[in-house]
Image: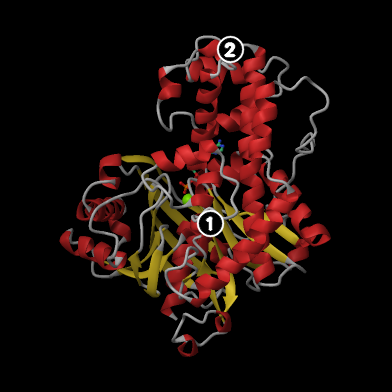
Amino acid sequence: MEPTSLFLFGLTTGVAVSAGARYVENLVMSRSVSSSPALPPLADRPRRRSVRYQDEVHRPDDDDSGDDIPSALVRLRKQFNVPAEKLTQIVRHMVAEMKKGLHDDHQTMKMIPSHVIRRPNGNETGSFLALDLGGSNFRVCEVILEGNGITRMRQKKFTVREDLKTGGGAELFDFLADCVASFMAETENKFNKEERKKLGFTFSFPVQQTSINAGVLMSWTKGFHASDVVGNDVVQLLQEAFHRKNVNVNVTALVNDTTGTLISHAYQSPNTYIGVILGTGTNAAYVEQLGNIPKLKDAASFNSDEMIINTEWGAFDQENVVLPFTEYDFKVDRASINPRQQAFEKVISGMYLGEIVRLVMLDLIETGELFAGKSSEILKTKYQFETAYMSRIERDHTLDLSDTKAVLEDIVKIPKTSRTDRVIVKGICELVGRRSARLSAAGIAAIVTKINRLDGCTVAVDGSLFELYPHFANRMRDALREILGLSAENIVLEQARDGSGQGAALIAALAEE
Ligand code: ADP
Ligand code: MG
């Protein structure tokens, strides 16, 4: 078990980190989280990290004028376009599915009550551990809430090997406990051996939460498949691993990354009602009225009017009623480790976009329309065309698409590409990338509609896809306008960061009260 990166320490106050500086974030550590009175009034504070919308050369989806469009692209465009009417239809269906999920268990959208009934006020204090499992890295963090909006954090990242993701559950949880032990050992002097550390566990998979620190895994997603975990309480599994490994830690909160994102962003932006993840996977959480959750039988026992709901929207429409699945999407789905599940996730999230593009390219190679019919071993290998390549290609504005050439020839090892080849590949990325952004926007529009916040609502969005994929936010905004008209202006998309670390610690702190 080797730490793969970063062991850091930092201090932040109410000052926001500038946009686009994701990796700087890891160096500077956590950001502000407070609307506490110690901070200057909002108007005097530095500008928050609202997403700035770069100007995209705006090309309506059905505009075929201008350059000669290769016929392959014309054909693909018909398959991958999602017109405004379709988006509206998706929104309507999702609102209906959300209501079903709030009413009964075992619905497509699981609409999981998070048991988080309070949002932070900035005065929370204390030192907490946080674990983040379910993203591309596994992280262990120590978050110190100092009150008055000051947070300090240290973290260490680990890679979860593929054999652990798909092996025995006990080995996976032992690995997590080992990572925590190694983290604590490196700062031994800081940890009082007698004191039992409280830990917030961010576990970003569909969990049937039964209390703030108990929940049963319903199914694995995102490439995880460890045995003997589905159907069990993951907090108990983690606690048992700590016991086996003699690690003095108490798991006091079980958190989904979407809920963490919402909570940690609500700290600085009180108007935040929705948290969205657009990374390896996709999901969203939002603030619901307790009275609108009929399946929550003990609603009256919560001393609150509201509760955060984890929608698990990645599963939306796995019956395939409204989503515009193409033949390529069906192929990705059939070859995945979870066929017929996570339909929405498979057309949106970073794990799958590159794979869709890869399959389209292979198809065009077959028909002789791409790379003179030649392929490469890399291109023939599942999941080897990364979504990050799409970002690079979409950002390539050189006349002869030289960076696209570098990706295709140097990385993917296609023997030779023509300019037309590269135009086609860039066009494919654009179609798949835009579709993802538009469908994510439809999801957000559905939630905003459901909670009737068309007059104003901040949406905290975390994840590399949103942050690093060019034009992603613009394309979402375009779609929101098409769906919501002028009201779209009231929906503010903001880049969120580290909900899964800081958010988990905050929720552990809120759970104490
Ligand atoms: P996670 O969702 O795993 O917690 P991230 O939000 O960082 O973590 O998302 C990682 C995913 O984002 C990767 O699996 C990949 O699909 C995608 N990704 C990584 N880099 C880029 C990029 N430059 N552009 C678009 N997508 C990216
Ligand atoms: Mg994440």
Which residue is at the front of the view, 162 or 414? 414
User: Which quadrant of the figure contains the C terminus?
Assistant: bottom left
Task: Report if residue 269 is visible in the image.
Answer: no
Instruction: Give the side of residue 62 with respect to residue 262, left or right.
Output: right
Determine whether the residue tagged by mark 1 lies in a helix, strand or loop: loop
The residue that label 1 is drawn on is 317
Q: Name the kind of residue labelled 2 in the image.
A: Thr
User: Which mark is on residue 442?
Assistant: none
What residue is at 37 percent from the left and 45 percent from the top?
Answer: 223
Q: Secondary structure at mark 2?
A: loop
Q: Residue at x 54, y 48 (%)?
A: 463
Considering only vertical position in the picture, is 480 above or below 399?
Answer: below
Asked which quadrant contains residue 244, the reply is bottom left
Relative placement, left or right, of 21 versus 318 is right
In this rendering, does residue 8 appear at all?
yes
Q: Count up the numbered dots.
A: 2
Residue 342 x %, y % = 47, 52
Query: Going 28% across and 56% down the picture, which residue do you hit?
Result: 188
Q: Amino acid at mark 1?
A: Asp
Q: Residues within 10 Å of mark 1 (few under 14, many from 20)?
A: many
Residue 483 position by quadrant: bottom right
Nearest the eye: 464 or 155: 464
Label 2 neighbour load within 10 Å: few <14, some 14-19, many 20+: some
